[in-house]
Image (cartoon, rainbow, N blue to C red):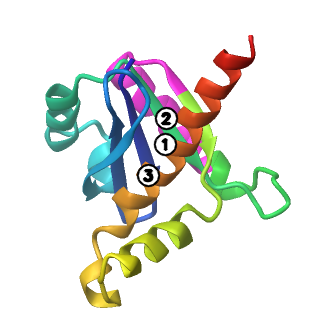
Amino acid sequence: MRTLALDIGDVRCGIAVSDPAGRVASPVCVLPAPEVAACAASFLRVLENWEPDELLFGLPLTLAGEEGPQAQRIRTIAHSIQAGTGLPAHFADERLSSKEAKRELRQMGYDERRMRGKVDMVAAAVFLQAWLDAQHASVGER
């Protein structure tokens, strides 16, 4: 089952996708957040190209693990996108995913200037991979 992850920010939306088996996450692209929220042609092209079975939205929880105003904003946008696409939606904790994405990009030799525009899609891949791993671990426990 292919999952498309969305890391929705105020300006940009990072997009990542899993392989068809739902085991490995890969960064895809970054689109303007308003285009994704409106299910504009650019976002619909991504859906057409990758043909996901479900959507995973990064939920910005507080460090205490609670939902604040930002998480509620993401839930509202997610429900709108879900209605526009007809795809089932899930939510994943995205705390510290951007920090991890920056660490990974630094290890690959990117400086702050070259990282710009890549962090969001790598962050989406980070929380997607954690979610996929948790899904497979819970299936293995049954």
**Which residue shows up at 60% across the image and 53% down it?**
94
Q: Nearer the viewer, residue 14 or 79?
A: 14
Count the marks: how many?
3
Q: Which residue is mark 2?
A: 56
Q: Which residue is mark 3?
A: 124
Q: Nearer the viewer, residue 60 or 73?
A: 60
Amino acid beneath label 3: Ala
Determine whether the residue tagged by mark 1 lies in a helix, strand or loop: helix
Q: Earlier in the sequence, mark 3 or mark 2?
A: 2
Say which quarter of the image contains residue 99: bottom right
**Quadrant where the C terminus is found in the figure:** top right
Q: Earlier in the sequence, mark 1 or mark 2?
A: 2
Q: CA distance from mark 1 to mark 2?
A: 7 Å
In this view, 130 is above or below 60: above
Marks 1 and 3 in Cβ contact (< 8 Å): yes
User: Is residue 10 something one can see in this rendering?
Assistant: yes
Marks 3 and 2 in Cβ contact (< 8 Å): no
In this view, 78 is above or below 27: above
Amino acid beneath label 1: Leu
Q: Residues within 10 Å of mark 1 (few under 14, many from 20)?
A: many
Residue 30: which disc? none
Span colored in magenta: 73-89
In percent of width and height, residue 16 lies at: 34, 45
**Which residue shows up at 39% across the image and 17% down it?**
1
Determine whether the residue tagged by mark 3 lies in a helix, strand or loop: helix
Q: Which residue is mark 1?
A: 128
Is residue 87 one of those drawn in magenta?
A: yes
Determine whether the residue tagged by mark 2 lies in a helix, strand or loop: strand
